[in-house]
Amino acid sequence: MAKQTSPKLTIGPILFHWPAEKKRDFYSRIAAEKSVDTVYIGETVCGKRTPFFEKHYEDITKELQKSGKTVVFSTLSEVMIPRDRALVKRACKTKHIEVEANDASALLPLSGQPHRIGSLLNVYSEDTMRFLTEKGAHHFCLAPEIPATVVETLAKTGQSLKAGVEVQVFGRMSLALSARCYHARAHGCVKANCQFVCEKDEDGMDIRTLTGRPFLSINGIQTLSFSYLNLINETDALARMGVTHLRISPHTCDMTAVIRAFADVLDKHISAQEGQARLEQLKINAPFSNGFFYKKPGHQWREDEQRAAAAG
């Protein structure tokens, strides 16, 4: 029997509109984390944010690569106007690093060359994975709402195609994208003159129901879960399925602590329960969730004994 290979840790693109200095500091800290294999950079949510950090991409790419990281440039996830199309085309011509497509507009310019498929360009079936592989895709980050049974099927398909399969294991989950910017509207602005109000909410703007219950989080045109996906207890199951990479999505909490908790669990230095205890010590102002993994509502949290039963 082939020896089970431990998945590698990746850092997904920063989804939020952080100040340039905060992003620079974040990537410098990630460069020092030996347990991180791959780092995704690039603006994936709103093309209007691109100029704030575009000039820093070359420097942070060099810094990350010098520390041994694979750097991948993620494209926009929604293309609405000519400016967005131009940004995607330019991203697809990025030299020295791979590109992750998050919208179908990137598939034509990337066709025939090695590239990755991001979680915002949904891949739900084996046939879709095979088709995209024929066009040059060799790595797929699955959408967070995909349950364990489907993850396992797609991971096996990825193995047969010699393609990497990545699953998000930490952070708020992207649920939907809109042509309009609710974030701007909530602050009395319109999308065309948003005044970049999304910078006020560095982990997203929390939305509550009429009864005051926290429900979702808004990040520009993107709707996110209020809860933070946390699959630290499922890392063994994901490894057995053949998942090759585990994605951690950046937030303002202590990301170094998050990375080391997952790395120590993967390396068997601590148990999953100990890793979970470390994450709970971060005191994130939102609950953890893993419901989608178990074919349940995504905001739900399955307890240890239920997870053990599901894992068989």
Image (cartoon, rainbow, N blue to C red):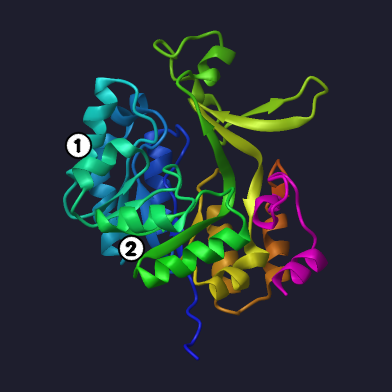
Magenta segment includes 138:
no
SS for callout 1: helix
Badge 1 local density, few (<14 within 10 Å), some, or many (20+)?
few
Q: CA distance from mark 2 to mark 1?
A: 23 Å
Residue labelled with disc 1: 90
Residue type at the position of mark 2: Lys
* Outermost residue to the bottom: 1
In this view of the protein, which residue sits in the foreground, 135 or 173? 135
Q: Position of residue 158 (x, y in %)?
A: 41, 66
In this view of the protein, which residue sits in the foreground, 67 or 306? 306
Relative to 281, does residue 80 appear above or below in the rendering?
above
Displayed quadrant of residue 62: bottom left
Q: Position of residue 232 (x, y in %)?
A: 64, 63
Residue labelled with disc 2: 69
In this picture, which residue range is highlighted in magenta? 289-312
Please state which of the two labelled residues, at mark 2 or mark 1, is closer to the viewer: 1
Q: Position of residue 159 (x, y in %)?
A: 41, 71
In this orientation, does residue 259 appear?
yes
Task: State the residue at coordinates (39%, 28%).
Answer: 46
Residue type at the position of mark 1: Arg
